[in-house]
Image (cartoon, rainbow, N blue to C red):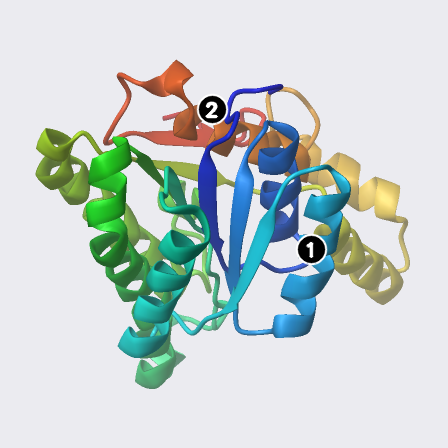
Amino acid sequence: MTNLLQDKVVVISGVGPALGRTLALQSAAAGADLVLAARTQSRLDEVAKEVTDLGRRAVTVSTDITDQASAENLVAASVDAYGRVDVLVNNAFSIPSMKPLARTDYQHIRDSIELTVLGALRLTQLFTPALEESKGAVVNINSMVLRHSQERYGSYKMAKAALLAMSQSLATELGPKGIRINSVAPGYIWGDTLKQYFEHQAQKFGITVEQIYEHTAAATDLKRLPETEEIADAVIFLASSMASAITGQCLDVNCGEFHH
């Protein structure tokens, strides 16, 4: 991924300790300067230091993307800092309710859609003038929940399906402005968050993490789980000029667990 984003300005929302952090570091390694947005300033500062250690610039903006004024401040801060924006990555995430739809609280569904769908729409709308000027790209982080209807994922699937539909419509609407809109849909991501979950499950059921990993990976064609960096690489590809003719698409990154 060396130099794929050389001297591009990449804005990432939802920067946390998992995929958001990796997206920032992989983008910096690809030559980009960053705008890091999330609610927790201390987390942003930690990731920003890692970015600057790689020799790239990082601006942090504490942001609530469900709030119009806060989102507007993010756009203004981004443009003030760099004078341009080339890529927007909508990575904000809300924890699924993990209850059947029959027992899912309506407010939880509303909050999920507000963040996942309307938050991404809000940022895309606000960044459109800057992205039109740079002929830039938006990459929305989706989920393999699109490809299955397993129990307890109903409200999460509702939000992510709406995010995909929105992405496709925006691709059509913003294409004439030269803006590309694509999605990346990971399934299991082998990183610290999943490792901690597997460790919890291993203790609960009296088995090993390796056994849980092997059982989970057995459902994939490659017999392994994609790592956080591999998800970030797919995002960087879609954000780069190598994907200049790709828009309105959803790239599944799941080691072949589902086919689409």
Q: Residue at x 60, y 27 (%)?
A: 30
Question: Which sits in the foreground, 221 or 167?
Answer: 167
Q: Position of residue 82 (x, y in %)?
A: 44, 47
Q: Residues within 10 Å of mark 2 (few under 14, many from 20)?
A: some
Say left or right for 95 vs 142: right
Q: Quadrant of residue 64?
A: bottom left
Precedes in sequence: disc 1 or disc 2: 1
The kind of secondary structure element at disc 1 is helix
Separation of disc 1 and disc 2 at Cα? 21 Å
The disc placed on residue 237 is 2
Eye-nearest disc, 1 or 2: 1
The kind of secondary structure element at disc 2 is helix
Q: Residue at x 65, y 50 (%)?
A: 21
Q: Is residue 208 above or below residue 115?
A: above
Q: Position of residue 117 (x, y in %)?
A: 29, 60
Residue at image mark 1:
47
Q: Residue at x 41, y 71 (%)?
A: 100
* Labels 1 & 2 near each other (Cβ < 8 A): no
Say left or right for 178 vs 231: left
Using the rendered image of the protein, determine whether residue 58 is visible from the camera's viewpoint: yes
Q: Residue at x 27, y 75 (%)?
A: 68
Identity, as a three-letter code, of the amino acid under mark 2: Phe
Using the rendered image of the protein, determine whether residue 226 is visible from the camera's viewpoint: no
Identity, as a three-letter code, of the amino acid under mark 1: Val
- Position of the C terminus, as image quadrant, is top left
Say left or right for 173 vs 39: left
